[in-house]
Amino acid sequence: MSEDASILARGVSDAEDRLLTAAEPLAGLQLRCGGELPGTIAVPELLELVRKTRRYGFRLARAICAQDGGEKVTAWVEVEPCVGGEGCEIRVRSWHSAPIPSEDAGAVEYRRTLTERHLAELSVQLDAGQRVLAVVCETPELAEVAAAMEAGLGRLWTEFLPLEDVTHHQPLHWRLLDGARVRVAGSERNWRVALIPHMQPGLDPAGFELLLLSDEPAPQPLPEPAVPVAQTRRSLVGQDLAPVLKQPISRIIANAETIRTRLAGPLPDAYSDYAGEIASAGKLLLELLEDMADLEVVESEGFSTAPDRIDLCEVARQAAGILGVRAREKGIVIEPPQQGESLPAIAEFRRVLQVLLNLIGNAVRYSPENSRIWIRLEDVGDRARVIVADQGPGVSEEQQARMFEKFERLGRSGDGGTGLGLYISRSLAHAMGGDLTVDSAPGQGARFTLEVPADPDV
């Protein structure tokens, strides 16, 4: 049997990686993948193989995968540079197709939740009674409702986002509210909410994450009138860049997550991984943008916090609840202060929560799977302390001296951090009249201590 007898299909590409001619079944796959004939190669793994063959100048062969409707196609393909030309000859030597297995409903729901988190333009943390605990706003259009929620912590979220076409009053079961349409004052867009419960096995939800979403694009803001430099000093990142960049970056992340999680349809593992890399890069860019905006604030002249009487125990429990889902994904158990504990202090609630979210988030990020994180309180006279301890790799004395510096990541790469969180957190602690310190040793975990003034009247 001749070598040509084992060839199922042939094709020819040009110097611009366009498929000029192709026989079945390669031609049909090209068309069903959205390409044309002739036209740019529409099968991503085949396109990559052709590009490498052209670049290196010698024959390459490997198995490629593609989705053809409801089937997964695996083919063995050889690609060889054309003699005397800049294109390539493509030879398909095997072709196997199999139905794509249906996915578990729980996995689909989990991926839907991830996608909605990235599409959300407003995120609200709720307690078990659906009362507002913390608010994160992603678009200037929602700044007014976000400010109202921050001023009304402890109230039901439906007081700020009235339900459409619902005559019943709260409390309603959260499943009846998941996906409900709501009205947003001052916005002409249609909005809906997604409620994600913080579940504990065998128990009712300990709280909720509320996401506000719209399927319509946000209106473009009108250009602001020029302000003479002599009159005011603008915040470049916080006022100029962050509002403009946050939404498109969030959309890039959301679209990449949609591709990665296959919500838009079946996809080979390699392409899902490519989309995951795009989403990870987008998340890092968004985190850096937010940290740079915070950096501008804490380094601005005259920056100060708004001290108030708070309970550090309650803030610590809320921070642990917000990051509980992320911790459980790694099998990490967060032990917050016990119910009934209390530690009154004088500090700004929002800033203390921001610092604790950074400390607990770092502990989750760098701790091994199936470990524990402890949050403990200490009353030391005129000072009140919150301690976050983990079972991570720990840091040396030399690293401890550097870890609160700007952009210091202690040589780590690829872990998603920006190197600004601890610097900003210590700056906030100092602004509240306190401090942020670390006690650690290699192999013994880390113990971060946030210290703020105690409430003298208690």
Image: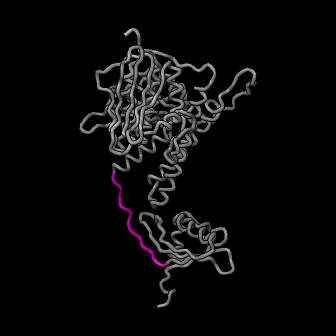
The answer to whether 84 is drawn above or below residue 196 in the figure is: below
The image shows residue 120 at horizontal and vertical percentages of: 48, 38
Q: Is residue 75 visible?
A: yes
The image shows residue 366 at horizontal and vertical percentages of: 42, 42
The answer to whether 235 is drawn above or below residue 95 in the figure is: above
Q: Nearer the viewer, residue 63 or 309?
A: 309
Q: Nearer the viewer, residue 431 or 195?
A: 431
The answer to whether 131 is drawn above or below residue 176 in the figure is: above
Residue drawn where x is 47% and y is 71% of the image: 63
In this view, the residue farthest toward the left is 202
Magenta stretch, residue numbers: 93-104
Q: Quadrant of residue 40?
A: bottom right
Q: Is residue 339 magenta?
A: no
In this view, the residue farthest toward the front is 397
Residue drawn where x is 36% and y is 39% of the image: 391
The image shows residue 29 at horizontal and vertical percentages of: 51, 69
The answer to whether 310 is drawn above or below residue 97 in the figure is: above
The image shows residue 236 at horizontal and vertical percentages of: 66, 31
Residue drawn where x is 48% and y is 42% of the image: 118
For residue 438, side relative to residue 229 (left or right): left
For residue 230, side relative to residue 290 (left or right): right
In this view, the residue farthest toward the bottom is 1
